[in-house]
Image (cartoon, coloured by chain):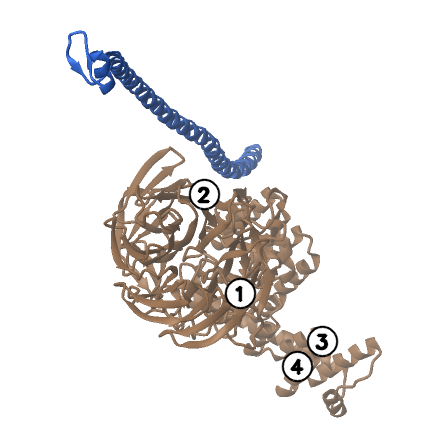
Amino acid sequence: MRLKTSLLKEPKHILFLIICVGWTTADELYSCSEDHQILRWNLLTSETSLVVILPEDFYPIDLHWFPKTVGGKKQTPAEIFVLTSTDGKFHLVSKTGRIEKSVEAHKGAVLAGRWNHDGTALITAGEDGQIKNWSKSGMLRSTLATQGSPVYSVVWGPDSERILYTSGRHLVIKPLQPSAKVIQWKAHDGVILKVDWNSVNDLILSGGEDCKYKVWDSFGRLLYFSLAYDYPVTSLSWAPDGEVFAVGSFNTLRLCDKTGWSYALEKPNTGSVFSLAWSADGTQVAGACGNGHVIFANVVEQHWEWNNFMITLTKRKTMQVRNVMNDAVDVLEFRDRVIKASLAFGHLVVATSLQCYIYNTRNWNTPLIFDLKEGTVSLILQAERHALLVDGAGLYIFSYEGRLISSPKFPGMRADMLNAQCVSLSNDTIAIRDKSDEKVILLFDALTGKPLGDGKSLTHKLEVVEIALDQCGPSTERKIALIDKNRDLYLTSVRYLGREPKICKIGSMIHSMAWNNAANILCGVQDNQFTVWYYPSAVFIDKELLPKTLYTKDGSEFSHAPHILSYVDTKVRLRQRDGSLLYTSVPPYAVLLHENSSSARWEDALRLCRFAKEQSLWACLAAMAIANRELTTAEMAYAAIRELPRVHYINFIKQQPSKESSLAHLLLFSGQVQEAEATLLQAGLIYQAIQVNIDLFNWERALELAVKHKTHVDTVLAYREKFLLTFGRKETNKRFLQYAKGVEVDWEKIQAKIEMELSKERAKAANASVRSSLAQRR
Amino acid sequence: MAQDLLEEEGIFFDEFNKLRTLEPDVSQKTSELKEECKEFADKIGQFQEKVGSLIELVDQLAKETETEKFKAIGARNLLKLVAKQREALQQQLQALIAEKKTQLERYRIECDALSKVESEQNEFINQFILH
């Protein structure tokens, strides 16, 4: 990725510093300079026109457009902007350049003025060290901070509840509520000149006179710091989607990834870049230069990779597709600027400012084209059957035939704040992490756009950082993997009937994760190693088996905590902290094993495991076989990993007299005690249900069942007595004491009763099988 | 006698017997002086003319020297500036080189990773063929 810069030959503001710039639409920019002029730059017609000449004593400092209305409402172009000046005033100026209102705000110059994200408040910061909060119409609400030194830069937090400002070498995050805690930390070795805070990824940028720029998270933890370059950092700005940012200093323009490393460096002849502003679609950035130029830079040369295709955005409207298998090159031309693109599952989806193009990788000549309602697509996600487009107004699912399938909506939706970490798409489900309560995951049916099930969302006990839906298998077994604030990885079912499923922890210290495209295999970067969960659902079947199904690779080959970009077939693509791409491969056996198990070819699966001779595969097979109630295979697999107790138990299950009993014991095998008991009770096998509870030393429940069904109370008491005797203890439980009085324990009678129950069950099972075989014959 | 008397009265006669109020010697000398004076004035005039042109020439020279001097100073400054510009350019290029170097390092790491994957795959294929 790099920046393609363009400068006019002659500066428009001759011999004057340009101080500030701001975009109205994707193609229109306003610039303001010390020669008291406000110019409008139209990029479509490349015309520059004078909007207004300000009074002689008016020296502007900062310009910020009123934000577009957001949140599903129709978007209107910005109409007014705030302009701050050296005489301590800020001015609300209309699009035509008329000063609607001037407000005396600070002593000395007003160094920054910023609207909050929904345009309900304005903050200004002045040379006098004060930060003031104003209403939309310019009425003073409060003075947020007072300090001894000038505040050079101030920004709103993503929730518009906090502000971030500079205080010499320190950065301060101050919530608007007076009682809330203020975070302050030393950020640079020189005076900090500029800060920015992105609302999508919640990261903070700062740059100062020590010639460095740094990336912080919203708790003030340092994520990245640059080298000390030659000149102080005079400006920086996040792209709206939070994927990249631009940094400006003397004769320098730099494009950086959100993790801090720099994609590209440009050395245009601009003087110092005093202010940077991204257009709303995030494809171009404008800079106000010290020598009177306005520099425009387009982001080009992004790359996309999928299987054997490599796609590069060569120009703003041109893509080059290279097939690495035969070196065939196709060139795709678009009518408008390319804003976003995504390549996966054999399809390329390209969003330009007006249209969406869908290409099949088999045919690059005839794309499917349809119009987009609104220009600024901020995110594209793909699943095997459809793609999700997110723009400022909402979420839309399109099939690869270009048909709108659904458009999920939920209250409080802020579509412009969604990123790839908090949205996940699969063939049948969409999961979205709620922005207002980060513990909640909202689930939607992808085909109807309605909330899943009874509309209840998934709630985790901690804030969720990243979510991912698995891509394969039937929709009823859809699972979601989530990473929470503590970097623990959890797995749970998305679609369920009845009881809410457990959220099971399957790993800790996970930095990043991705599902495979062809099978439900999860890979993740765990602490300092690369881990693959060959069969994550094993956690629901046999918790102790899960660690055995893992495939790990030593992480020494990659530096600290790389980010997983994709996991296609056997190839995993990762991006390191320094920006370098890494590839690593995973043995292909697990994918094959998944295929065999889903098509119930257990013989093949066994052969595969014998061929590969890997413990992890055997463990997977064991779990898969149990999940599919394939006891013979499971027995062999457990034997292969030397889990003797389990082999015995499987044998025991096989010997169960009736179907219901074996089903219940299978459930017990997976630790689902309540389900097992319910199954038995449903089948009328009261004694068996009681016995299960006795075996688990769940005495109270056993007695409760016995009393409720008025049978086997003596059995429970007998076992309890035996148990207490073994441990040399006395009965203290009141209920047992109470029932022990009225019941006589006679082991022989009990044995006889048990025997009777068992034979009854056998007889019933035999009857059932005869009946079913009769039914079959008919 | 009469002549003396006349001479006393300040009246003289010259060789051509014309009446004069001035002594003939004096008159002659006066006219000589006049001639000489004229000659002198002429010479002075000539001298002045020559000196004037000389001065003009010198002035011109001075001017030329001055411009040359300025030119020299300018050239010298330019030279210094070029050196500075070169330094700035060098710095700029250095920065660009450093950027390319980091990019190269990234590519190298990527290449390493890819070749590792390749060797892994070859190993896998070999294993597969052997069985």
Tell me, yes or no, whether the two marked residues, 1 and 3, touch with CB atoms within 8 Å: no
| Amino acid at the residue labelled 1 | Val
Image quadrant holding the N terminus of chain A, namely top left
Dot 4, crowdedness within 10 Å: few (<14), some or many (≥20)?
A: some
Disc 4: which chain?
A
Image position of A129 (left or right of A34): right
Q: Which residue: 77% across, 84% down?
A: A746
Chain letter of disc 2 in the image: A
Residue at the disc numbered 2: A264
Q: Is residue B17 above or below residue B44?
A: above
Q: Which residue is mark 1?
A: A464
Q: Chain of mark 3?
A: A
Which tag is nearer the camera, tag 2 or tag 1? 2
For the residues tagged 1 and 3, is the chain the same? yes
Extreme-front residue of the structure: B1
- Tag 2: amino acid: Ala
Q: In this figure, which residue is indicated by the disc labeled 3? A: A697
Mark sitting on residue A701: 4
Which subunit holds the residue at mark 1?
Answer: A
- The residues bearing labels 3 and 2 have C-alpha atoms spaced at a distance of 66 Å
